[in-house]
Image (spheres, helix red, strand yellow):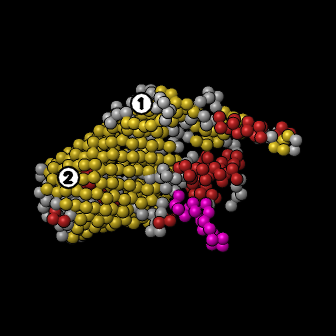
Amino acid sequence: MKRRSILTVTLALMAVAVFLPLNVKAQTSSILYGSSRNPLMNSVNPAFFPSNSRVYISLPGVNTNFVSPLAYSSIFQYDSTENKTFINANNILDTLSDNGAMRLGLNVHAVGLGLNFNRFFLTFSTQAKVDVGFSMPQGLITFLNEGNYGHVGDDYIELLDGQLLTARVYGEAALGFGMNINDNLTIGARAKLLVGYFDLSTAGSSARLYTAEDYSSITGVMDLRLNNTSALEVVTDEVTGEKTYKIKSYMPKNYGINLDLGVRYATDLFEVSASIIDFGPGIHWNDNVQQIVSAREDNSFTFSGVDVSTMMSGGHLDSAYAQTLIDSLMALTETKTVDGSDYWTSTPTKVNVGGMFHFTSGFSAGLHFHGEFDRGLTKVGEVFKTKTTGFYSNTSLLARLNLYDWVEIVASASVITNNGKWNWFNPGVGVTLTPFRSFQVYAFLDYISNIYLIDAKQFNISVGLNLFLGSSSAR
């Protein structure tokens, strides 16, 4: 293990302290895709409708997914000889250098309605969603590990790029339609109206480090651009100067639209299905848009070493000279807020493919593939540009057991990829209870990366309630 300077360790700890909370992102639950009775199955494939009801009302439920390259054991290490726990900065840097992508997502299912008319069905749902993503630039990680040596021959070191941070809060209202083409084939489609409440992204930002050919100096150049729009506004008290936040609008003019498509073919022996979720341009942000940018036009600083004769005065450190160096560095991070122009952001698009074999009337098993990618859709002038910024997938082995008409148990074992990083064993289980065929409570826990919580780097949790009317016996 290479030696690292105090500055390197400090920067590593700062990065973890600031960004570790941003490590969760919504995925399609394999347990939910394998269910036959939970109404929320329609949210992952619009051709799905619960087999035990003509009318359902989905009540508030929550889905949270946690994904991070760092587990608790990656950050903290116990020293038995000294009986104390310390932060392992070397292990943090090594782990992030292998995969620095962190993700966050939270879905709150507010209310939903489903009506089944035999040959076709209608669905309506509302959700509140939070998407946060952070990608640690690999150039910064290499620099923290190896300094300039890791970039010998490069024109510059990319310390920060536009994919560093994205954070978004938006609402969704969806209207879906499904049709039974025949006794086996069902197709479905859903249109989603999106309303954006908050967006923050570093698209367009950069920080680069240039080294002179003769290694006599290093020049840092930072161009900070944070796109920001919010339904909140800052109100300053004229007397006390105290700043408070209030909601500017409950329906901001940040609209968008996405589409879902699904298909399902089912017989008494087997079923196959596929869906594409959240396909479309995303959200057009044009209400209260601002940009946080670098305060200086020439936002650069050149370091040519320290003049010891100037730095030392009378045998003591000249604090004024040292402060000048610190002020020059801090000036790179000075920002100002300006009015911004409208822009677009896309939401992650998901693809699902599944198949189940019915061994008995109550037991089925099969496979589910889920792929999710950020297209990085942006609008520059009148031109849309697309850049895939990440791909995540999981392939799950599913088993479903339906007991009587009111108990469903789904188990899964998933193989997960995260930008080329593989995690080979991630079990899960979900239980759905529907007593009296009218009231339903469910709890899912899947994509568990490790049964030991201190080593866990991801898991998915879903809990909620549903009501049924006109229920019938189900498989």
Residue 114 falls within the magenta-colored stretch: no
- List x then y, in percent, for residue 455: 50, 65
* Residue in view at x 70 percent, y 53 percent: 6
Q: Quadrant of the N terminus?
A: bottom right
* Residue in view at x 43 percent, y 44 percent: 374
Say which of 149 and 233 sits in front: 233
Q: Which residue is mark 1?
A: 288
- List x then y, in percent, for residue 369: 36, 57
* Residue in view at x 45 percent, y 63 percent: 449
Label annotation for residue 213: none
- Whether residue 385 can be seen here: no
Residue placed farthest to the bottom in the image? 81
64 relative position to 224: left or right:
left
Say which of 368 and 25 sits in front: 25
Type of residue at label 1? Asn
- Contact (CB < 8 A) between labels 1 and 2? no
Whole-number angstrom distance, CA of label 1 to CA of label 2: 36 Å
Q: Which residue is mark 2?
A: 57
